[in-house]
Image (cartoon, helix red, strand yellow):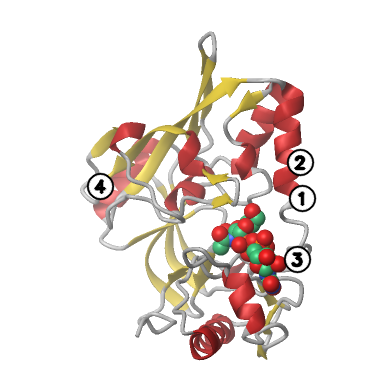
Amino acid sequence: MTQSCEIRRGVPLAPLTTWKIGGTAAEMAIPRDADELCEVVSHHDKVYVLGGGSNVLINDGMIEGMFVSTERLLHCEVRTSDSDIYVSCGVGMRLSKLVSMAAENGWSGVEQLFGIPGTIGGALYGNAGTRMGAIADAVDSVELTDASGDRKLLSRYEMRWEYRRSFFCDGDVIVGAVFKLRRADKASVALAMKSAGEARAAQPTGVKTAGCVFKNPAGDSAGRLLDTAGCKGVGVGGASVSDRHANFFINDGTSTAADMAELIARCARRVYERHGVRLELEVRTVGFDEPIISSR
Ligand code: EPU
């Protein structure tokens, strides 16, 4: 391979996730720009892009394949017109940076994303959001590369987003995105962000979690289903279900990926037995040979 991108070997992954769980990456690329990112993607069959590590369960042990860190892809450029603001972001930029830029300048369009951890790339990958809306609502265009390194730019009219799911094909990697915001009143932007913050009041803070573990089924709440199935306080090894919000699973500092995966499977089973609902994972799993919950 004739690439110039920095590659590290034997990288511990747990510190790079909010759950603080995961084994070791056999290899990790740290591209400096979009060209290097595309080069890495085109040279490897199995690529796992790691953003803020806030929505991922990485298995224990040595994980083969090429991890890609987006920590250097922090590009951010603002263009303005009379009423609109276009913010072009690298995938490694924190989502909270975009949200705070909008708050400071009175730009409307990303209030619904206030308080969500992680990076722009991770948020786009899972169409992150809250009950007020998702990141897709603010996207003007997204640049992707396919597995062969060919780049394509998609406008908002060419994208089909779903709840907590992006439209990207398997193997596509997000290279960057442009967000379209509107000039607004600073106070009204602040007020909307305050109410997004208040919606998170029942969620646990100051503990090792990955946000909501399961997606909400249509018209219902995974947290409510888990709670009423008696999952609060259930534990496996160092992993347990939060007693504040049943869709948050906590690592007490000693949980392995195997503990967390077993806890997730047990709770999904309980919900199915109690409510007949098959919950779907919101967190992405990496390095597991089999799905950690049954779909049948
Ligand atoms: N509920 C319970 N028990 C629980 C948790 C919730 O009965 O243990 C009930 C609540 O009382 C409420 C309903 O379930 O009536 C919904 O709960 P909540 O308002 O906490 O919202 P949620 O549906 O659990 C969603 C997003 C969160 C986002 C909040 C606030 C999903 C899977 N979750 O949670 O996003 O922060 O709304 O907007 O879409 C995430 O995606 O990682 C995430 C945390």
> Which of the two labelled residues, at mark 3 and mark 2, occupies the earlier sequence position?
2
Q: Within the image, what quadrant is residue 31 found in?
A: top left
**Residue sitting at x 51%, y 63%:** 219
> Which of the two labelled residues, at mark 1 and mark 4, occupies the earlier sequence position?
4
Along the viewing direction, whichever of 103 and 229 lies nearer the viewer? 229
Residues at discs 1 and 2 in contact (Cβ within 8 Å): yes
**Residue sitting at x 50%, y 72%:** 58
Amino acid carrying label 3: it is Pro
Can you say which quadrant of the picture contains the C terminus? bottom left
User: What's the CA distance linking mark 3 and mark 2?
Assistant: 18 Å
Disc 2 residue: CB within 8 Å of ligand 1? no
Along the viewing direction, whichever of 209 and 65 lies nearer the viewer? 209
Counting other residues with Cα less than 10 Å from the Cα at mark 1, is it few (<14), some (14-19), or many (20 or more)? few
Residue 150 position, x and y percent, is 22, 40
Residues at discs 4 and 2 in contact (Cβ within 8 Å): no
User: What's the CA distance linking mark 1 and mark 2?
Assistant: 6 Å
* Residue 146: mark: 4
Along the viewing direction, whichever of 241 and 175 lies nearer the viewer? 241
User: What's the CA distance linking mark 4 and mark 2?
Assistant: 38 Å
* Residue on which the image places disc 3: 204
Residue 155 position, x and y percent, is 33, 31
Disc number lying in front (3 or 2): 2
* Residue 194: mark: 2
Counting other residues with Cα less than 10 Å from the Cα at mark 2, is it few (<14), some (14-19), or many (20 or more)? some
User: What's the CA distance linking mark 3 and mark 4?
Assistant: 37 Å
* Residue on which the image places disc 1: 198
